[in-house]
Amino acid sequence: MSQTFLEKLRNNIHLTEEESKNFISSVFDGEIASDFLTEVLLLLNKNGFGSQELTGFARSMRDVSRKVISEHNVVDNCGTGGDGIGTFNISTTASLIAASAGAYVAKHGNKAITSNSGSADVLEAAGVNITLTPDQVSICLDQINFGFMFAPLHHEAMRHVAASRKSIAPDKTIFNLLGPLTNPAGSNIQLIGVYSKDIMQIVAETVINLGIKRAMIVHSYDGLDEISIFEKTHVLEIIGSSVKQYDINPNDYFENKDKISDIIVSSTKDSLELMNLVFDNIDGPMTKISLINAAALVYLSGIEDNMDNALKCCKEVLASKKVKQKLSDLIELTKSFE
């Protein structure tokens, strides 16, 4: 990789999508030294990266991923993490509710990096076998509407960036945004929570560049990378190439006297306990926040045409105990692959 490339960044000139894609492809091929990559990542942080750079990185990461083939129009609920709040695993809980309501959910996730419990941690603690092949994930989608893709098994090339990311930690890099943008099942419908309102527009532009058809990019005013029930949530909703901007007010859906501290956990065990309370349809903030995020998935999937009806649908599914059965089915099916 030439010094000209580095000089461009040192002079605070944005990379094109092609330059970004070619560079990170060389990284994934093991052709770039860690110290060179570290300097590039630090310069991108200093300059502020744009949607062309993010798109190029995402396209390259998608190219080298182990893909899941599905005939279904799958939806994913994957956030950037990094909000620093430490809630239980809302996205996984909401995803299982949405799958029980008829959505096909290809959940992309990992073990905890910045949180106290990642989606892989809580599913594994529940008894789910998370180390599936792409074909086995496809079978899960076909049979029970839900497949979990453990990120390290689908993005093996990320081993080439581990040293650089570790040297920069705890600061975030462009790679923190790539998880939601590199779903191995090629999801064209996504609920993407981000850690800062400042990056919402860049993520929205990248989503459009990547051809994702329906999406909601969300960040709540209390800092969550989820739709919140404690404060309003800012939304960029994408349909095709159009973007609609609005706020979701939780008071429109719930009588709310809850505190965010009620859903903060310190371990995977605590996260699983709250998830199980949701599946038992126990009233509380853990259930409300899971329902409103599940409703967004049901709405984006086209099962219902607005959030009001989607929330009603999710409440009915939860009350029927179908979600608890969905988790049992997931455990049984994934264990059968061992």
Image (cartoon, rainbow, N blue to C red):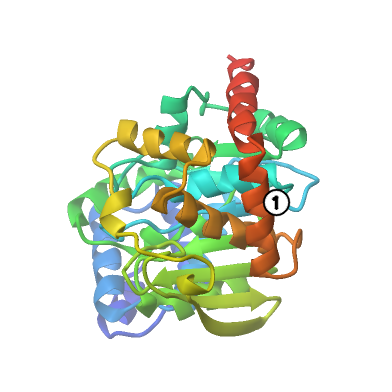
Vertical side of 194 occupied by 197: above or below? below
Q: Is residue 230 left or right of residue 133?
A: left
The residue pinned by badge 1 equals 74
Q: For mark 1, does the 10 Å Cα neighbourhood hold few (<14), some (14 to 19), or many (20 or more) residues?
A: many
- The image quadrant that residue 228 belongs to is bottom left
- For the N terminus, the image quarter is bottom left
Would residue 132 be seen by someone viewing this image from the given angle? yes
Would residue 16 be seen by someone viewing this image from the given angle? no
Q: Is residue 195 left or right of residue 185?
A: left
Between residue 139 and residue 101, name the one nearer to us: 101
Vertical side of 27 occupied by 138: above or below? above
- The image quadrant that residue 234 belongs to is bottom left
Q: Is residue 218 left or right of residue 37?
A: right
Vertical side of 250 occupied by 273: above or below? above
Which residue is at a point 40% across and 53% down the rendered structure image?
A: 285
Which residue is at a point 36% across and 79% down the rendered structure image?
A: 198
> Residue type at mark 1?
Val
